[in-house]
Amino acid sequence: MEQKWSLRLIRLAAIFGLIGTYLGSHMAGSGGYEYRPIHAHILLVGWLSMFAWGIFYRVFQVKSAKLVMAHGWSAIIGVVGLIVGMLFYNVNPFHFGHTFTLIFFIVGGTTLLISFALFIVVTFMVRPSKKTSV
């Protein structure tokens, strides 16, 4: 289970890394920095956090497959929800209502917060292996 989630999270991290660097390149070229917080969060939680979680799952075995799955899905939903919610809230390219964009932003961020809390629990539920000592 960990190996599957490791690869899944690392692949998503690579996608977010490409999107984040493209967005940064676009901002630098156009001189418009309205996407700056979105760019920063794509690289921080989309690239860095997803990659770190993927490496963790590559190195450690976790006692609960359900916990790994809950963390993985909450991470994916949370990162996408936070970034899209931030885009809707700050830029609002589709002219959604303020209440909708605020709720979308809050739900995405809260889901990501839950994901980080689940990851803390995951770190205390690792099995000792020959590769690592805990």
Image (spheres, helix red, strand yellow):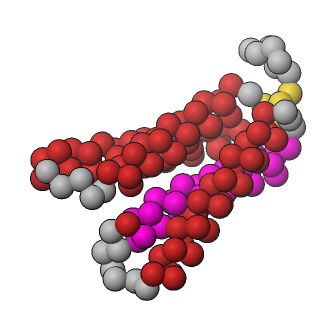
Residue at 76% over, 15% down: 132
Is residue 73 highlighted in magenta?
yes
* Front position in the image: 110 or 78: 110
- Which residue is rendered at x = 82% and y = 41% of the image? 121
Residue at the (27%, 50%) spot, across then down: 23
Number of numbered discs visible in the structure rendering = 0
Up/down of 59 relative to 27, above or below: above
Q: Let me know if residue 15 appears in the view.
A: no
Q: Quadrant of the N terminus?
A: top right
Horizontal relation, residue 83 to residue 3: left or right: left
**Front-most of residues 127 and 43:** 43
Q: Which residues are magenta?
A: 64-89
Q: Position of residue 8 (x, y in %)?
A: 57, 45
Residue extending farthest to the left is: 30
Q: Position of residue 29 (x, y in %)?
A: 12, 47
133 left or right of 45 in image: right
Q: Is 67 left or right of 20, judged from the image as shown? A: right
Magenta segment, prevailing SS (helix, strand or loop): helix
> How far across and how far down the image is residue 53, in percent?
62, 37
Q: Is residue 76 visible?
A: yes
Residue pushed farthest bottom? 97
Q: Find residue 21 and report its image quarter.
A: top left
Which of the pair 116/76 is nearer the observer?
116
Residue 92 sits inside the magenta stretch: no
Figure quadrant of residue 98: bottom left
User: Up-down: is 104 above or below 19?
Assistant: below
